[in-house]
Image: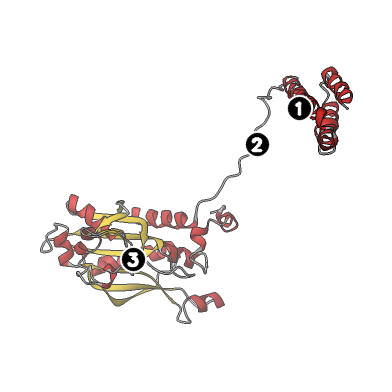
Amino acid sequence: MIEKIEEYLIEVANFNSSDKEEIEQFRLRFNSKKGILTDLFAQFKDVPNDQKKDFGQKINTLKQAVTAKLDEAKERTESDIVLVKEDLTRPGFPLELGSRHPINLVKNKIIDIFKSIGFTLSDGPEIEDDWHNFSALNLPEYHPARDMQDTFFISQNPDTLLRTHTSSVQIRYAEKNEPPIRILSPGRVFRNEAISSRSHCMFHQIEGLYIDENVSFADLKQTIQFFTTELFGKSKIRMRPSYFPFTEPSAEVDVYWGLNSETDYRITKGTGWLEIMGCGMVDPAVLKNMNVDPEQYSGYAFGMGIERIVMLLYQMSDIRMFSENDVRMLQQFKSL
C-alpha cells in the first residue's frame, strides 16, 4: 500500500501542464470526492496498527504535494493570460436618460408662473422650533396641531419638530427683510398622519406671501385667477369662506373642472368644482410677529399641496406612488 502511494507521489511530481482541461482532470483524479486521496483515507482503517503511522504520514505528504501542484498550476495559468488593450476609438455605450419626478415637474411649473409676476424663492430648515412653526403664526398654545398626534416632535422644552407647513419660511424671511415682500416657499412638510391612498406623513407644499402698502383681497383674487388660468387653463374660480389661524379673512379656492368625463364626475364628486388651495389676508397679529407694522402694511398669503395638484393634472389616484420610485410610473413622464 505504501509503495502505491510512492508511485502517486512520483506521478504528482512529474505533472507539469498549463492546459486547463488537463489540470482539471488532475484535480478530479486526486482531489475530488471520488478521487485517490478520498480512497486512501477510507482505506486507513484497514491498515495494520504497526503500519498506520507510516501510512498516515505518506497520505499527508501526498495531499500536500497535490495541493502545492494545483496552486502552482493555477498561478501558471493566470500568468499566461494575455491582457487585451481596450480600443479607445470604439463608440461608447448609450446612456439611457431618466426623467424628472412629476412633483418636480409641477413644482417648477408653479414657480415659473409666480416668478413671472414678481415672486422670488425663499427656503428654510425642515427642523423647526415652536415659535416659527406655531406661535408666530397665531396658533394658540393648546391648538390641536400642536399635539403629538398631528406633529412629529423631536424634543420638548424647548420644542423642536419637523415643520408642518412652509409658512415658517415666511416668518423667517419677514424677520430679516423689510417690506415690500413677495416670496414663494416650496418644500417638504411632515405630519403625523396614517398613510393611505389620499394622505401621507411626508408631502410637498408651496406657499406664497405678499406684503406691501394697500394690499387688498382683490389683489389676492386676481393673483389666484392668473395662476389657475396659467396652470390649469381654466379661469372660473370660486372662493369659499374658511378659517386659518394666520389669515383673516380666509378662503378656500375651488376651480371649475367641468363634468366632461366619468373621471371628472369621480374627482369632483359630481359638482364640477375642485378645491386646490387655501388663502387669505395676513392676520395683523402675524404681521406684528414678523416685525411688520400692521397699520402701514397689509398682505395676503396662499398655500397648496403639490401632490394634490399633480394628482389632478395627471389623473393619479394614489398619493403613495410619488414616494415609491416605481420606474414604470416615472418612465411615463419622460416626454414632459
Where residue 82 appears, x then y in whole percent?
A: 74, 20
Which is more N-terminal, label 2 or label 1? 1
**Residue at image point 56% right, 48% down:** 98
Q: Quadrant of residue 19?
A: top right
How far apart are labels 1 and 3 at the CA level? 89 Å
* Element on which disc 2 rests: loop
**Residue at image point 14% right, 58% down:** 292
Can you say whether 44 is above or below 160 in the image? above
How far apart are labels 1 and 2 at the CA level? 53 Å
> Mark 3, mark 2: which one is toward the viewer?
2
Q: Residue furthest front?
A: 50
Contact between labelled residues 2 and 1, with CB atoms less than 8 Å apart: no
Where residue 155 appears, x then y in whole percent?
A: 27, 58
Q: Quadrant of residue 286?
A: bottom left
Amino acid bearing label 2: Phe
How far apart are labels 3 and 2 at the CA level? 48 Å
- Label 3 crowding class (10 Å Cα cut-off): few <14, some 14-19, many 20+? some
The label on residue 60 is 1
Q: How many marks?
A: 3
The label on residue 224 is 3
